[in-house]
């Protein structure tokens, strides 16, 4: 009798855990889906012109239920930045973990960044037009590296590896970061403004070479 | 009267730092009463160095201070012969200090020949490599308590657990970082800015090796009161096989990123955590602990 009770209890705990896990996963999936929709709206309409009811409507959810996922617009904005940093960081991590040379990795990073800019432009647009242009929204929750940590950490590891291998020049991290990401961000911005005469991918090779020449050990 | 264990203290290529450090041991009289010193460079002993060099005595504990150079002569006998003879009579061989343990500072003078007793840096090599009798007490110099602990354990017939570098776990399983009074500054990435200040962490710029050095300096305090990091000087990692390194007052960085990170932590994890920690300004940690103007 006692053993039976213990088995029943264990089974019910296991089922409860499975159920909780499934609910959590579902909620996380739903959150990601909301962020992806909101991301597109913010990037195209701007931060202040996009309202929570508008996002809720777009995802097919009542406004009340929507607040179960994100307590405020600022909270949603922060979570989106963390999400973008995580997506880019994951791509960069794969490049970092590969056994390619530092020079080849620069090619891969440029290619990856431009590919994302073309296939999922809202990710880069959000960073350039929302995150950098509406600092008052992010000052408290996203101070310093807090919301871009995944991506910046991978760049740090890339630079550290490059210097250790004697390929890149040892210099201040932000000087190198600004040169690398400022350049890429600038090109994506020009592309978004339809200023570039050629498709973005046509510039990959020349840009990667310029970055390599600027960062390499002389 | 029960005969006392016989202790022989020999020196290789040394600065006498460990001998001098051990003179500060508060319970030195207990050690002198418990062990018979066959020979010691400074303390009263039964025999002269000439008598020891004739290789006619036997010892229970051999303490060797300084780096090992097999060609070095002591009172007409070469070091290789002396150590071979006394090493075979001893039950325990203590390599005292980083030079005796790994080659240390004096290895620099002749890297091809000079080693420790059982290790050449971190490679197993030397007259007592692989010997189960060998105990390494690394440090430049050793804390007197480290040798005191080891001798008291031997006197009490207790087993001394050793790590993979033959160092007593009781003394070397800790890091110099453990017990450091600057740990809160380390957590929030607040730099010391200068040597000798009470505030800030010395890991970021001043070359502190505390988070990657096996030593109990901040647990068993020096002179019972302090440690290098507590007075504002970086830990040089003097208990590790790679001591001495170059530019010991500087943290080696690559594009502002520390080349070495705390022991056992991946650089990715470390950078993720510190990147976030650095984003916050904690006014309390940016102020002087004691304001000179008040």
Image: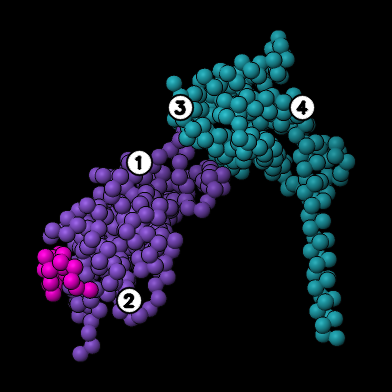
Task: Tell which of B146 and B72 is nearer to you.
Answer: B72
The numbered dot on residue A169 is 3
Q: Residues within 10 Å of mark 1 (few under 14, many from 20)?
A: some
Work out whether disc 3 and disc 2 sit on a shared chain.
no
Q: Quadrant of residue A76?
A: top right
Asked whether the residues under marks 1 and 2 belong to the same chain, the reply is yes
Dots 1, 2 in contact, CB < 8 A: no
Q: Which chain is purple?
A: B
Q: Disc 4, disc 2: CB below 8 Å?
A: no
Label 1 chain ID: B
Task: Residue A140: give x, y in percent of width and height.
Answer: 59, 42
Q: Position of residue B240 (x, y in %)?
A: 37, 54
Q: Residue at x 28, y 72 (%)?
A: B89
Mark 1 sits on what residue?
B250
Q: Is disc 3 placed on a helix, strand or loop?
A: loop
Q: Residues within 10 Å of mark 2 (few under 14, many from 20)?
A: some
Foreground residue among B3 and A14: B3
Using a 10 Å C-alpha cutoff, classify the residue at mark 4 as few (fewer than 14 neighbours), some (14 to 19) or many (20 or more): few
Indicate left or right for A123 with B250 as reference.
right
Same chain for the residues at labels 4 and 2, yes or no? no
Give the labeled residue for mark 4: A119
Q: Which range is magenta?
A: B39-58
Residue A75 visible in the shown view? yes
* Placement of A151 over or under B237, stated as above or below: above
Location of residue B262 in the rendering, given as x and y in whole percent from the top left corner: 47, 51
């Amino acid at each position: 009798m006692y053993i039976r009770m213990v088995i029943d209890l264990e089974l019910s705990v296991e089922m409860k855990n499975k159920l909780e896990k499934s609910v959590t996963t579902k909620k996380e999936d739903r959150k990601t889906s909301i962020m992806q929709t909101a991301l597109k709206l913010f990037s195209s309409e701007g931060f202040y012109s996009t309202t929570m009811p508008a996002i809720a409507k777009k995802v097919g959810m009542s406004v009340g239920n929507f607040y179960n996922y994100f307590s405020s617009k600022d909270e949603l904005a922060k979570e989106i930045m963390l999400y973008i940093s995580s997506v880019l960081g994951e791509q960069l991590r794969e490049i970092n973990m590969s056994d390619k040379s530092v020079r080849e990795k620069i090619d891969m990073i440029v290619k990856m960044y431009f590919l994302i800019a073309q296939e999922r432009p809202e990710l880069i647009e959000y960073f350039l037009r929302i995150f950098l242009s509406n600092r008052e929204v992010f000052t408290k929750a996203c101070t310093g590296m807090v919301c871009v940590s995944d991506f910046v950490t991978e760049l740090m590891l890339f630079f550290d590896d490059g210097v250790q291998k004697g390929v890149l020049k040892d210099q201040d991290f932000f000087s190198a970061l600004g040169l690398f990401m400022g350049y890429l961000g600038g090109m994506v911005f020009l592309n978004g403004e339809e200023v570039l005469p050629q498709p973005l991918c046509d510039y990959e090779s020349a840009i990667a070479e310029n970055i390599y020449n600027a960062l390499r050990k002389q | 009267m029960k005969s006392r264990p016989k202790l022989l203290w020999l020196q290789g290529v040394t600065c006498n730092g460990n001998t001098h450090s051990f003179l500060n041991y508060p319970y030195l009289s207990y050690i002198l009463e418990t062990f018979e010193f066959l020979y010691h460079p400074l303390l009263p002993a039964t025999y002269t160095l000439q008598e020891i060099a004739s290789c006619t005595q036997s010892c229970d504990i051999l303490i060797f201070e300084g780096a090992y150079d097999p060609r070095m002569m002591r009172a007409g006998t070469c070091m290789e012969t002396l150590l071979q003879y006394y090493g075979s009579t001893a039950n325990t061989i203590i390599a005292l200090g980083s030079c005796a343990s790994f080659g240390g500072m004096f290895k620099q003078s002749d890297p091809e020949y000079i080693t420790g007793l059982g290790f050449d840096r971190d490679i197993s090599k030397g007259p007592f490599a692989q010997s189960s009798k060998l105990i390494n007490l690394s440090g430049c110099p050793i804390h007197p308590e480290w040798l005191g602990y080891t001798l008291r354990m031997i006197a009490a017939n207790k087993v001394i657990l050793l790590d993979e570098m033959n160092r007593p776990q009781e003394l070397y399983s800790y890091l110099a970082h453990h017990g450091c009074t600057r740990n809160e500054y380390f957590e929030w990435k607040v730099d010391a800015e200068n040597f000798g200040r009470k505030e800030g962490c010395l890991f970021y710029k001043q070359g502190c090796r505390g988070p990657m050095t096996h030593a109990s300096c901040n647990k068993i305090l020096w002179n019972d009161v302090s440690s290098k990091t507590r007075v504002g000087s970086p830990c040089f990692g003097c208990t590790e096989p790679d001591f001495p390194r170059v530019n010991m007052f500087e943290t080696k960085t690559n594009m502002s990123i520390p080349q070495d990170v705390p022991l056992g932590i991946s650089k990715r994890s470390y950078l993720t955590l510190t990147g976030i920690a650095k984003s916050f300004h904690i006014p309390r940690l940016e102020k002087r602990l004691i304001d000179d103007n008040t």
